[in-house]
Amino acid sequence: MELFTAIFTGTIVAATPLIFAALGELVVEKSGVLNLGIEGMMLMGAALAFWAVTAGYSMPVAILAGALAGAAASLLFGVLALTFLTNQYAAGLALAIFGSGVSAFIGRGFGSDPIEALHGVNIAILSGLPVLGPLLFRFDPLVYLALAMFVAISWFLYRTKAGLILRTVGESPQTSHAIGYPVIRIRYMAVLFGGLMAGLAGAYLSVAYTPLWVENMTAGKGWIALALVVFATWRPLRVLLGAWLFGGMTILQLQGQALGLQVPSELLSALPYLATIVVLVLISRNRQMLALHFPASLAKPFRPAG
Amino acid sequence: MHPRLELRNISKRYPGVVANDDVSLSIQPGEIHAVLGENGAGKSTLMKIIYGAAHADSGEIYCDGNLILAHNPAMSRALGIEMVYQHFALFESVSVVENIALSASSAFNLPSLAEKIRELSLRYGMPIDPHRQVHDLSVGERQRVEIVRCLLQAPKLLILDEPTSVLTPQAVVKLFDTLRQLAAEGCSIVYISHKLDEVQELCDTATVLRNGKVTGTARPKETTSLELARMMVGSKLPEMHVSPAAPSEKPVLEVRDLSAKARDHFGVDLKDVSFNVHGGEIVGLAGVSGNGQAELIALLSGERRHGQGDAIKINGTPAASLRPDERRKLGLAFVPEERLGRGAVPSHTLWENAVLTAHRFGTVRKGLVDRRRAAAFASGIIDRFKVKANGPAATAQSLSGGNLQKYIVGREIALAPKLLLVSQPTWGVDVGASAFIRQTIVDLSRAGTAVFVVSEELDELFEICDRLLVICQGRVSPPLLRTSTDREEIGLLMTGRTMGKDQTGSSSVALQD
Amino acid sequence: MRIAAPVLASVLTLIVGSIFFASLGHDPLPTLYAFFVEPLSSMNGLSEWLLKASPLILIACGLAIGFRANVWNIGAEGQFIMGAVAASGVGLFWSDPDSALLLPLMFLAGMAAGMAWAAIPAFLRSRMNTNEILVTLMMTYIATLFLSYLVHGPWRDPAGFNYPQTALLPAAAMFQSFDPAYRLNSSIFITVVAVFLMWLFTDRSFLGYKMSVSGAAPLAARYAGFRESAAVWIGLLAGGAAAGIAGMAEAAGPLGQLSPQVSPGYGFAAIIVAFIGRLNAFGIVLGGLLMSLLFLGGEGVQMTLALPSALTRIFQGILLFFLLAADFFIFYRIRLVRPAPDAHALETAR
């Protein structure tokens, strides 16, 4: 039972940064923009949140700082991709490299000491419940925030007019422009939101998940989040399921190392990356399924005519 | 009483072109007013100015006697001016009601909006299901959505830009009924067209444009076609020379029981398509767009391949599983409907675009591109087909649509094909270039080449084709001799009415009426 | 006109760099001098400059062939590592460590390993429709972990004081230095040949023409019958081969052994080099020299001014940002000066 609890809660926690980052990217891609720079935005979020904690700010302020750092980084991408109409692949890559450099620069004086991690919640009765308490009600608040974001984004995309506008901008910016919607402004907002979520994901890594600073500590999680969006065929529920799947993979691999499996740890560590490839292959073979929810204008620069 | 809309001395210039030159017109409440003119006469610019999507350099617009200042589409809608675009502003991935909600100013309440749509569409005799996804709708149904979207705003003036170019003759009749009903209720209608017969049937008044100028105002019901045509194209009407066909004994293109599933759910399945095209004749394929033309042309050109090789034979050789370049070795040439991005690479020069299909004609040697020969080849086309371009080093995207089309047609003809496929040969091309391109195609066929033309313009098909096929819901009719059929029969076939007995209920999906 | 954007971007990067240094409390001019001039003011500096430029240029040439066809291999880092691993494996374990064939064999092994690592995403993209960006990246993480496993485990030098590194390669497995005092070696000729081949392929060959059509207008490529899968395979294999060879040359040159830090990020930096070079052979040479200088400068200021080497990555990112932005301004300025080519837009405007 204890092992199960450890694996279950570990999975939920490991999935949380992926949920933030992938849901954010989902909104960005739904608006027709592809931001490959998640890794860079996460790193900046992680570095800034960690800095804020070491500088003595409170946890909420630190997390907010991380989110804002991600948003600021996404603005760089937005200016290039939306105002300057550059190749979105190139702009996203530039952001990934830049973010990794800036975060390393910010983190140069952090040393290797851990900080006190974000605490789990303590909800009077619920957290004390036998079995269910430790299983469901002792996570840190960001875990619940991630789930709330899932509900909010699903509702926003499919139940509100603003969500409808966002989705249709992603299908055809030309048509949206023709009927009078400010395509560029809408896309900016989506990109900023994606940056905010990536920054949050990064902050979660450095102040809650592994509360210490290591250069390039995201270790590809930003790229896995990108893959999750494809895996989810642009649907929020599948993003959630995919994130849990990958969270579980990470935890099983860690548990495997702890249980002393006779496999070198490097090879076990490669599992999530390998799994990403396998999952991408399985989902991409079905072109029809991909096409169904695919934002038709994804990564195509748009300039309003006239 | 003031006219509903009045234009006074509207002029609009784009660099190098005068789109509108001192245009004045006036429309009364309940009047159906035609703006008649050829492609490029300045009709669309004028409509954009009326709607506020473009601004005139000089001149004034009055609505119900009031001068409109600081004009834009939002203000037009506030004044009760609505516009149905030629290319619909609809999103494929969402439903009818969601599409309409996007342009409605009312609160976001889909169920009540859906109810309104249902009521209104029934009242005007064009029922639509508000909950269907737009990608499942036929072109005619999409147009209804656009019109209903406008009607929900209770417009005082409705602008329609070439609304019948995508409809069957029968659907046109239905549309006209709706428009007359609207006019009777007091709504003014501006009807933009280049089709004389429609204007004569529907409109009370016509303003004719040529080269941006008003060349006349007429009551079309009391004016002869010839007079209207003179106003439209000037005194010199282009003439076609079509000598009788002398078809070869053996077919050059044979299609036998060709069936294919659509690539995605936006496409149409092809079912048992069979026909022949002989050398020396032109066979045309008529049909409302989206009935399988794109699938058929991709299978014929080799852009899509088919497992059953002998479903398509070129000069007797099974070709259905060959790639485009392999089919070209058998004598195929192909002019696709998209000029930029398919028939030519927009950012590449004309000589580079020559290499695209002419690489077997000396422009590539020992695996290297011979730039000098490619340039010479391109110059040859430019001279022979009178392409207006800044030499072979001009990029494809710098040419006007008509000139690029002449270049692509010229390039394909320069390959001396035995079989030429042409899709929408004169789409968006001005009168002069259209006539030239059609004549070129006719001349090629009379020199012995087999030609297969896909077009949505019935006029065009009747002008140049020897035999006609009709496609509907992925099925192709038996061939009809041009000389022994008429628009009525073709129109019926376009709706699938008189096709084979195995026609099932599903065909009604594509019905236009 | 083609060089205006890269030059403008470089100048802007310098300006931002000055402001950045100033804000850190360093006098900008001496800092810029330490970053960009000092490294080149000695023979050793020049040798290091070319030594680092060589792999960047080599990899960028390979990648650009793919980028021109819209094939986004961003996993050159992984292909580089696998090239280094395979070549070192041959160098370390070949039965005759003095054989004159050793170096050529390592060359082939490095190239083959880089190509093999790139062939997986090529296969997945052309057969399974799988996004090559994500696959090449994931393959990079896997390659890094694989290298780490080898040098911590089976290939670790028993006489290496437990450091995670292999034994030194035998002399026959090493490229000759031009001068024993400097590290620049004969592998630079490989890069020279690669630049020429890249130019021939992209500017003159029919195959290169087909690839450029695939990149600029995929539907036109299909219309003409050029195979999309061929573009994918060639694009990825060219990048893989180049990165694999570069990895081999790194192991058989300045390093002389395998360690977890085989690549100082050449695979990623080469992507930027390819863009700065406008995917053009000679542009890439200039871009590679510039990028190499950024690496050297970063190391230089780390030692002399105690600034972090992460500056190099920041400058790389800024440079690419400015390049992309400069493109926009130059492109639209031309359009404003010469509206004539816009006849097509005009027609649609009517």
Image (tube, coloured by chain):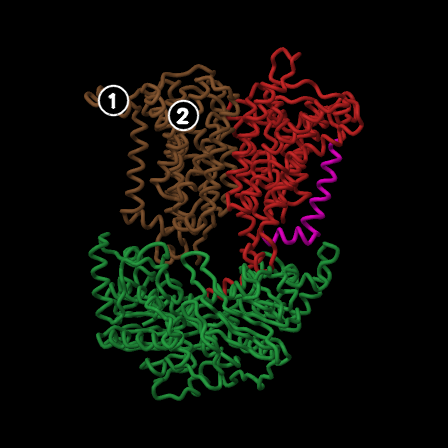
Q: Are marks 1 and 2 in contact (CB under 8 Å)?
A: no
Point out residue A176 in the picture as x, y percentages from the top left corner: 37, 55
**Residue B212 shows up from this direction:** no
Name the residue type under label 2: Leu
Kindly identify the residue that appears in the image at 51 percent across and 80 percent down.
Answer: B467
Indicate the colour of chain C: red
Report the chain holding disc 1: A
Task: Find numbered disc 2 in the image and state the secondary structure of the residue it sits on.
Answer: helix
Mark 1 sits on what residue?
A133
Report the chain holding disc 2: A
- Image quadrant in which you'd find residue C120: top right
Q: Are marks 1 and 2 on the same chain?
A: yes
Image chain in brown: A
Read off the magenta span.
C187-214
Kindly identify the residue that appears in the image at 28 percent across and 38 percent down.
Answer: A151
Mark 2 sits on what residue?
A205
Residue C198 is a magenta residue: yes
- Frontmost residue, C341 versus B155: B155
Point out residue A109 in the picture as x, y percentages from the top left corner: 48, 18
Assess disc 2: are there few (<14), some (14-19) or many (≥20) residues with their C-alpha within 10 Å of its C-alpha.
many
Image chain in green: B
Main SS class of the magenta portion in the image: helix
Kindly identify the residue that appears in the image at 36 percent across and 16 percent down.
Answer: A116
Query: Real-space Cα distance between discs 1 and 2?
Result: 24 Å
On the rendered structure, is B94 left or right of C91?
left
Residue C258 is a magenta residue: no
